[in-house]
Image (tube, helix red, strand yellow):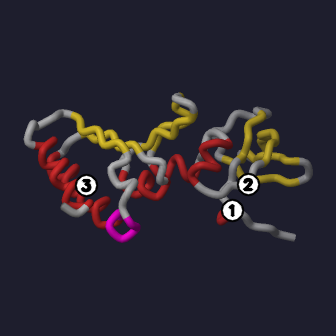
Amino acid sequence: MRAGQLISAGLARALVLKPKILLLDEPLSNLDAKLRVRMRDEIRRIQQQFQITTIYVTHDQEEALTMADRIAVMQRGAIEQLGSAVEIYEEPHTPFVADFIGSSNFFRGTIERSNGCAHMRVGDIRFGRRASAPPHHPRPRLPRSERGELNR
């Protein structure tokens, strides 16, 4: 049997038992890139068709971001952040999560309020921030590189 067929057969054997939860531990780690994408789509289709909760363990960030409704990023056995792919990518809570999921710039500053808006001050530079952020609260700011903008 080919690798993709082995994975499909393993899923079929598991699903015939009608489990409430399906645990997949790095099921695609030994596949080439093209087959990985095809099998990723197949696993997602099966998961949705059978409406089965699936715990999918992977070290592949792209797999996690494209397959999951919710993601738990773990470090040394502890959950660093739990959320949707968009939440984890756009608002990483820790430098580890930011670095693990994608490329980030790391700044440390203070949240300040002015004119009804909250901003993060890093030296003489101010970054926009949600109005719900607590004032004068030091927190690492982890903006994505593609969100950066320099104005004169």
**Kind of element beneath mark 3:** helix
Say which residue appears at 60% left-offset and 44% top-offset. Answer: 97
Circle nearer the N terminus (1, 3): 3
**In this picture, is 18 found above or below 46?**
above
The image shows residue 135 at horizontal and vertical percentages of: 75, 34
Cβ atoms under marks 3 and 2 closer than 8 Å? no
The residue that mark 1 highlights is 145
Q: Is residue 26 left or right of residue 127?
A: left
Residue lying at 76% horizontally and 32% vertically, measured from the top left:
137
Furthest residue toward front: 1
Local packing at callout 1 (Cα closer than 10 Å; few below 14, some 14-19, many 20+) is few
Camera-side residue of 147 and 121 = 147
Give the quadrant of residue 56: top left
Q: Secondary structure at mark 1?
A: helix
Gap between marks 1 and 2 measured at Cα: 6 Å
Q: Is residue 4 above or below residue 23?
A: below
Callout 1 amino acid: Ser
Q: Is residue 135 magenta?
A: no
Asked which quadrant contains residue 45, the reply is bottom left
Report x, y in % for residue 124.
Answer: 91, 52
In front: label 3 or label 2: 3
Vertical placement of 89 versus 110: above or below? below
Q: Which residues are magenta?
A: 32-36
Query: Do callouts 1 and 2 mark residues in contact (Cβ within 8 Å)?
Result: yes
First in sequence: mark 3 vs mark 2: 3
Q: Give the number of the disc on residue 105.
A: 2
Mark 1 and mark 3 in contact? Answer it, CB < 8 Å.
no
From the viewer's perspective, is the residue at label 1 or at label 3 nearer?
3
Q: Please give the name of the residue rendered at 19% of the width and 53% of the height, measured from the top-left corner.
A: 46
Mark 3: amino acid:
Ile
Residue on which disc 3 sits: 43
